[in-house]
Amino acid sequence: AEVHILTGGEVAGSFAPLVRKEYHPSSALEPEHCGAFLEKAPLGVLRRFSKLLRDRRDDGITFVWFGSELLDVQPGDTSNTLFGCAVDIGTTTVAMYLYDMTCGTLLETLSSLNGQIRRGGDVIARIQYAMEQEDGRAELRNDILATVNGLLDEAERKVPRLKENLYHLVF
């Protein structure tokens, strides 16, 4: 298998993410042809697709795929707007690297103190906290989720429409 590595904002080797978008104009979305797009699609995606067709928008629909699995549908042509994030969770710092998944370009690098630090300065102290406190594990989970969500909020202020087009997150 070929390994794809993203480094320093540039793509080393080939770039072929599993997450991709395909735009189809309204004229290509006649009911008799939609089965090919929607086979094995989750119920939520089928409902969104049905609503988009019912609204009969003239700007077509973008399909979001993970390999051969249909993840989502979006109104209009959003095929050039697709993001992915790599998140590095360290003991004291959480770093987030935001990529344009259409070309592999690094868009933003953000970092924040790990919110779990208030439960202990190192991993051993946090394990001990989780074992001794009744809700310790849930609190640690909530702390790291708050940290990552804070970074996503900060990233969206810099990159509009990030959250609605973020389909790949790696921890």
Image (cartoon, helix red, strand yellow):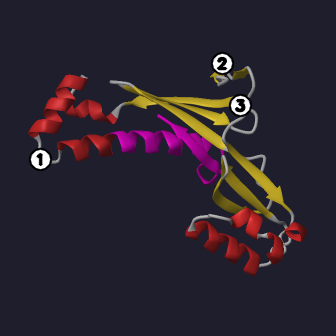
Of 66 and 111, the residue lying toward us = 66
| 93, above or below 17, in the image | above
Of the numbered discs 2 and 1, the one sitting upstream in the chain is 2
Question: Which residue type does callout 2 highlight?
Answer: Gly
Marked residue nearer the N-terminal end (3 or 2):
2
Disc 1 from disc 3: Cα separation: 43 Å
Taking 85 as reference, is 36 left or right? right
Q: Is residue 146 magenta?
A: yes
Q: Nearer the viewer, residue 97 or 23?
A: 23
* Disc 1: which residue: 134
* Residue 134 among magenta residues: no
Kindly give the residue lying farthest to the left in the view shown: 132
Q: Residue at x 74, y 20 (%)?
A: 13
Q: Which residue is mark 3?
A: 104
Q: Residue at x 29, y 34 (%)?
A: 116
Q: Amino acid at mark 3?
A: Gly
Of discs 3 and 2, which sits in the foreground?
3
Highlighted magenta segment, given as a residue range? 144-171
Asked if one can make out residue 80 in the rendered structure from this viewpoint, the answer is yes
Residue lying farthest right? 27
Q: Tag on residue 8?
A: 2
Which percent across, then down, holds residue 1? 65, 25
Above or below, comparing residue 143 to residue 40 in the picture: above
Which residue is at the far front?
A: 1
Is residue 121 among the parts visible in the rendering? Answer: no
Q: CA distance from mark 2 to mark 1?
A: 43 Å
Name the amino acid, label 1.
Glu
Q: Where residue 124 appears, x then y in whole percent?
A: 19, 24
Whole-percent x and y of residue 84? 61, 39
- Secondary element under disc 2, as helix, strand or loop, is loop
Mark 1 element type: loop
